[in-house]
C-alpha cells in the first residue's frame, strides 16, 4: 500500500485493529466514523510483536505516546483523539462515509499523478531507509513460551497469564 504509485484512502467504519491498523497506516489518507477505534492489542491477546517496519509506519503517523498506549498498554484509541493528532483526515457519520471517500478520491484524481507518485514514494523510502535491524527481538518474541501459550489461550477463548519466558 505504501509504495503504490497512486494515493490511497483507508475508510474505517468500526475498528482498525492489528493488521487493519497496519494497512490503514500505510494509506495516504484515513477517514472514519467518529466512533471508530484503533489499536494493536497484541500485548493482551497473542503476545507477539510487530516488525520494525510496522512500528515505523505507526510512529511516522502517530505521536510516540499514542503508539506506546496502543502497543504497550494494548489500548484502543478513539477516532476523535486520532483526528486531533492528524492521523485521521476527517470523521463522518456512517451514512456519509462512502460519499466523502468518493469525494476525496475525486479531489485526488484531479491532481498531477507524477507529482503525487514522487512525493508518496519519497516519503515511503525515507521511512524504510531509517529502519534498524530488529530481527533478534522478533525471534525472541515469536520463539517465546509466552507467545506459544498466548496463541493457545487466545484460540481457546481463555485469559493468559504472561510469564516473561
Image (cartoon, rainbow, N blue to C red):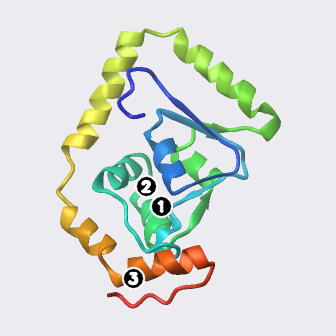
Report which residue position mark 1 lands on: 66
Element type at mark 2: loop
Q: Would you say the residues marked 3 and 2 are in contact, meaning their CB atoms lie under 8 Å apart? A: no
| Residue 106 coordinates in the image, percent (x, y) | 61, 14
From the image, state whether disc 3 or disc 2 is nearer to you: 3
Sequence-first disc among 3 and 2: 2
Residue at screen point 19% across, 68% down = 136
At label 3, counting other C-alpha atoms closer than 10 Å, the crowd grade (few under 14, some 14-19, many 20 or more) is many
| Residue 126 coordinates in the image, percent (x, y) | 24, 37
Report which residue position mark 2 lands on: 63
Query: Could you tell whether 143 is left or right of 27 in the image?
Result: left
As measured in the structure, the alpha-carbon distance from the residue carrying label 2 to the one carrying label 1 is 5 Å
Q: Is residue 155 above or below residue 61?
A: below
Residue at screen point 50% across, 28% down = 8
Element type at mark 3: helix
Residue at screen point 52% across, 33% down = 29
As measured in the structure, the alpha-carbon distance from the residue carrying label 3 to the one carrying label 2 is 28 Å
Query: Residue 146, which numbered label?
Result: 3
As measured in the structure, the alpha-carbon distance from the residue carrying label 1 to the one carrying label 3 is 25 Å
Query: Residue 88, which numbered label?
Result: none
Q: Is residue 9 above or below residue 18?
A: above
Q: Would you say the residues marked 2 and 1 are in contact, meaning their CB atoms lie under 8 Å apart? A: yes
| Residue 82 coordinates in the image, percent (x, y) | 57, 51
- Depth check: 86 or 7 in front? 7
Amino acid at each position: 500500500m505504501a509504495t503504490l504509485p497512486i494515493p490511497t484512502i483507508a475508510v474505517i467504519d468500526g475498528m482498525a485493529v492489528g493488521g487493519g491498523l497496519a494497512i490503514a497506516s500505510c494509506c495516504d489518507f484515513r477517514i472514519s466514523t467518529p466512533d471508530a477505534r484503533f489499536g494493536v492489542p497484541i500485548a493482551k491477546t497473542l503476545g507477539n510483536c510487530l516488525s520494525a517496519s510496522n512500528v515505523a509506519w505507526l510512529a511516522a503517523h502517530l505521536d510516540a505516546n499514542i503508539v506506546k498506549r496502543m502497543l504497550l498498554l494494548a489500548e484502543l484509541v478513539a477516532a476523535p483523539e486520532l483526528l486531533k493528532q492528524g492521523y485521521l483526515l476527517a470523521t463522518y457519520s456512517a451514512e456519509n462515509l462512502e460519499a466523502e471517500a468518493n469525494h476525496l478520491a475525486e479531489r485526488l484524481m484531479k491532481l498531477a499523478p507524477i507529482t503525487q507518485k514522487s512525493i508518496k514514494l519519497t516519503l515511503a523510502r525515507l521511512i524504510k531507509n531509517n529502519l534498524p535491524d530488529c530481527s533478534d527481538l522478533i525471534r525472541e518474541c515469536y520463539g517465546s513460551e509466552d507467545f506459544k501459550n498466548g496463541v493457545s489461550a487466545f484460540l481457546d477463548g481463555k485469559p493468559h497469564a504472561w510469564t516473561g519466558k
